């Protein structure tokens, strides 16, 4: 299926950039050994928003992301189905500490990606950003919206 056809299908279904669609955006700050890094994040806090995630999206910039907020801490599972961009998936505990990172995920993959440890928050950013900014397990998220 061509990119044009995919774009038409998403427009027919009403799937566009969540930034443009009015999803709440906030600033999230991660503090690592290399310094403090801010991301403009879309907040996915309802079941429907979490299920949609970044599927079909190609508009992320290096300082954009999506923050998934779950009702409770636990093992979190993701996949890259219908997601055209490779991502870093950063799993964050209820205490705002980075617990694990799934780096450079495979676009469109249906392989299950596990947090491997309990997480309450999940931050998705463009692939390679975590390594580029020196973000690793043990780092602290300063502001969770």
Image: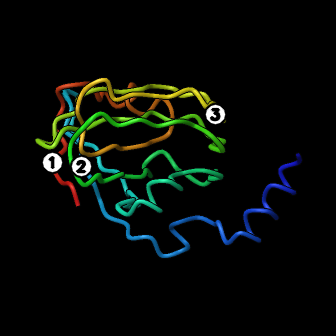
Q: Mark 1: which secondary structure?
A: strand
Q: CA distance from mark 1 to mark 2?
A: 5 Å
| Residue in the picture at 80% in, 55% down | 6
Relative placement, left or right, of 47 versus 137 is right
Q: Is residue 64 above or below residue 96?
A: below
Q: Cβ–Cβ below 8 Å for labels 2 and 3?
A: no
The residue indicated by pointer 1 is 142
> Left or right: where does residue 91 sit relative to residue 78?
left
Residue 59: image location, x then y, percent: 60, 54
| Label ID, residue 29 | 2
Q: How busy is the neighbourhood of tag 3: few (under 14 within 10 Å), some, or many (20 plus)?
A: some
Per the rendering, the mark at residue 107 is: 3
Residue 76, image quadrant: top left
Relative to 74, is 103 above or below? Answer: above
Q: Are marks 1 and 2 in contact (CB under 8 Å)?
A: yes
Q: Earlier in the sequence, mark 1 or mark 3?
A: 3
| Colour treatment of the image | rainbow
Comes first in the chain, label 2 or label 3: 2
Badge 2: residue crowd in 10 Å (few <14, some 14–19, many ≥20): some
Residue at (35% x, 27% y) in the render: 101
């Amino acid at each position: 299926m061509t990119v044009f056809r995919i774009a038409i299908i998403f427009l027919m279904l009403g799937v566009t950039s969540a930034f443009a669609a009015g999803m709440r955006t906030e600033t999230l700050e991660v503090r690592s050994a290399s310094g403090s890094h801010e991301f403009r994040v879309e907040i996915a806090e309802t079941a429907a928003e979490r299920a949609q995630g970044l599927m079909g999206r190609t508009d992320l910039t290096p300082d954009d992301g999506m923050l998934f907020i779950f009702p409770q801490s636990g093992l979190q599972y993701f996949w890259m189905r219908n997601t055209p961009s490779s991502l870093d998936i950063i799993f964050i505990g209820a205490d705002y500490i980075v617990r694990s990172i799934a780096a450079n995920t495979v676009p469109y993959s249906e392989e299950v990606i596990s947090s491997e440890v309990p997480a309450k928050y999940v931050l998705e950013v463009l692939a390679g950003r975590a390594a580029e900014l020196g973000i690793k397990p043990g780092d602290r998220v300063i502001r969770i919206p």
